[in-house]
Amino acid sequence: MKIINLIFSALSISLLFSGCSVKNSDRKPPNIIIILADDLGYGDINAFNPDSRIPTPHLDRLANEGLSFTDAHTNSAVCTPTRYGLLTGRYAFRTRLKSGVLIGHDPALIAPDRTTIGSLLQKAGYTTACVGKWHLGLDWAKKDSTKPLWQGGNAWDIQNTSNVDYSARVDGGPADRGFDYSYIIPASLDIAPYTYIEDGFVTAPVNQHVPFFKDTTARGIWYRHGDVAEDFDHRTVLQTITQKAVDFINREAAKYQPFMLYFPLTSPHTPWFPSERFQGVSDAGVYGDFVAMTDGMVGEVVEALDQQGVADNTLIVFTSDNGSHWLDTDIKKFNHKANDDFKGMKSDVWEGGHRVPFIVRWPEQVKAGRTSRSVICTTDLLATLAEITNQRLKPGNGEDSHSFLSVLKGEEPKTFKERTIVHHSVNGTFAIRLGKWKYIDAKGSGGWSLPEKQVPENAPAAQLYDMSKDSLEMNNLIAEKPKVAERMKKILEEYKSESKK
């Protein structure tokens, strides 16, 4: 069945883009690589912010050779829900996760029967891989099924994991959600357990425990205490997963069967651990050096494609899971705006929390050096890949995903200018974008920049911005445009009611 699907997809894609004859139907469908940075801001990349204090030559190259979206968003301002949305084409607030993120021992968030970009492309004949940070929950085995998985403390301060059977298969991860090959860490690099999992099995014994770690030389060099495997070193995780990604490309490039690599990076999320080669290369401190290293790892993936001779027919998507956790004090200290001039940061429903760099390079099909102002969301990847591979999503799957293939082909359809996107913050605050209007159902940022309890009591109960004139969200029009606000609120309430189901 895979061979039949592959032949069908090759023919469909060839006809879709070039109107070519059946003689060209033996053309291989595009390889697909999705690179998701962790806590990288819109303003970190030179191609998006010329005033960036960080060298990003490889990402700049991707932008110069591809299409850059300047109004792209994540469906959430923190990582777990964004990853869920990217893989499933569905807002994470529709799941049990209504705020915050998961921890390393939380159960799987993606339901077994839900379509992911992995399972979608498997049906199109692709060999699929997930390498990097998972952070979507895992179903760890218990030594004693009658006892809790962990005890003591709280979700962020687990004291006793003696009932976790690290030697058993780990269910609910990428190996069970559409990926033929997987090499992951369970959560963020600062959340235990610290271990690699390859195709559902921990790669080394987990028989040690590391204490809370903090290096006072920089704000972002720390991680929580927890279980650690014998082969795990926080300082080399980024290099390790990059090598695994390159190895996968090298294995699959020569085959006729196309491949898809989902490569969620662990950087530049805390702990900031730039390798010696990248230390001191930026003017934005240790964080800047770690961003530069992130750029370097992207360069290694691109170089592998070049060396294998498959770059022209490989679709690369690069983006971030949310904005940077970059403070006002950091901006003043380094004169670097990680989130450009956008208001807020990671966690917020303000633009700094979810407006992210978004680059698509596909030399054979996407014209180089273009910029698009179409409003897109990370949830849109599923529908886009479905259209590229000539598939229809099953009813009830990818309900928040809209294909932007037409934009890749050079169009700027009105549907994207009038696009509706629901934004969601770390504490569960909602906002909605509809065309040029953005309505925020809160007084403050919905996150860490300006919590509700710190907003003056006499402040307006909600916020309304005209994003066509005020993308920096400086002029709240809630009092001047009551009818617009009422309409936006009504639409948002419909989404919020769906989140309770």
Image (cartoon, rainbow, N blue to C red):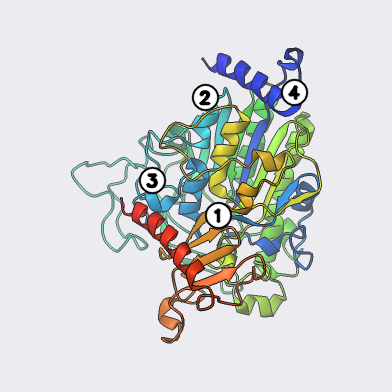
Q: Amino acid at mark 4?
A: Gly
Residue drawn at x 69%, y 26% as measured from the top left: 16
Residue drawn at x 71%, y 16% as measured from the top left: 25
Q: CA distance from mark 2 to mark 3?
A: 22 Å
Estimate how packed mark 1 is, as few (under 14), some (14 to 19) or many (20 or more) residues with alpha carbons within 10 Å: many
Q: Is residue 324 left or right of residue 167?
A: right
- The residue that mark 4 highlights is 19
- The residue that mark 2 highlights is 123
Tell me the mark number nearer the camera, choosing from 2 and 3.
2
Q: Nearer the viewer, residue 172 or 215?
A: 172
Q: Position of residue 242 (x, y in %)?
A: 64, 43
Q: Position of residue 132 (x, y in %)?
A: 55, 45
Q: Nearer the viewer, residue 249 or 166?
A: 249
- The residue that mark 1 highlights is 74
Q: Is residue 116 above or below residue 430?
A: above
Q: Secondary structure at mark 3?
A: loop
**Which callout, 4 or 3, points at the residue further toward the start of the chain?**
4
Tell me the mark number nearer the camera, choosing from 4 and 3.
4
Q: Is residue 51 above or below residue 290?
A: below
Q: Is residue 367 above or below residue 255?
A: below
Q: Amino acid at mark 3?
A: Leu
Estimate how packed mark 3 is, as few (under 14), some (14 to 19) or many (20 or more) residues with alpha carbons within 10 Å: many
Q: Secondary structure at mark 1?
A: loop
Using the rendered image of the protein, determine whether residue 26 is visible from the camera's viewpoint.
Answer: yes
What is the number of the mark on residue 109? 3
Q: Amino acid at mark 2?
A: Lys
